Image (cartoon, grey):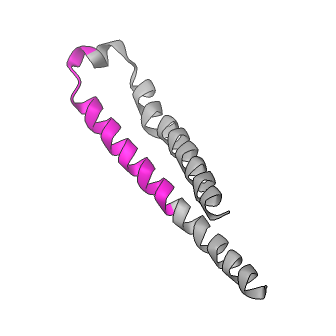
Amino acid sequence: MSAVFTMASLATALRVPTLSLAGSRMARELRKQLFESILREETAFFDRRQSSELVNRLSSDVAAVSRTLTDHLAKLVCAGIT
C-alpha cells in the first residue's frame, strides 16, 4: 500500500514542473506564431489598430490561452491516471 502512495507522490511531484514547462513552451510558440502573423500584415492593418492592442495580444491574451491549455492538459493527465 505504501508503494502506491509513493508512486502517487512521485507522479504529483513530476506533474507540476512538467506541465509548467509545457505551458511555457506553448506560450512561447503562440507568441512566436502571433508575432510572425502580425509581421505579415499590410500597412493598413497597423493604421486601423493601436500599438497597445497588438502588444496586449502578444502578452495577456497569449498567457490566458496558454493557462487554459495547461489547465486542460493537467485535467486530461489526471483523468488518464485515475
Residue at 50 percent of width and 35 percent of height: 61
Question: In this picture, which residue range is highlighted in magenta?
Answer: 21-44
Quadrant of the frame with the C terminus: bottom right
Residue at 63 percent of width and 52 percent of height: 75
The x and y percentages for residue 32 are 32, 44
Magenta region includes residue 40 = yes
Quadrant of the frame with the N terminus: bottom right
Magenta region includes residue 29 = yes
Q: Is residue 38 above or below residue 22?
A: above
Q: Is residue 41 left or right of residue 23?
A: left
The x and y percentages for residue 72 are 58, 47
Q: Quadrant of residue 8?
A: bottom right
Q: Is residue 21 above or below residue 61?
A: below
The x and y percentages for residue 81 are 63, 64
Residue at 59 percent of width and 73 percent of height: 14
Between residue 3 and residue 42, name the one nearer to us. Answer: 3
Q: Main secondary structure of the magenta part?
A: helix
Q: Quadrant of residue 3?
A: bottom right
Q: Is residue 41 above or below residue 26?
A: above
Looking at the image, which residue sits at the far right?
1
Q: How many numbered marks, from 0 up?
A: 0
Q: Is residue 2 left or right of residue 31?
A: right
Residue at 57 percent of width and 43 percent of height: 68
Between residue 45 and residue 17, name the one nearer to us. Answer: 17
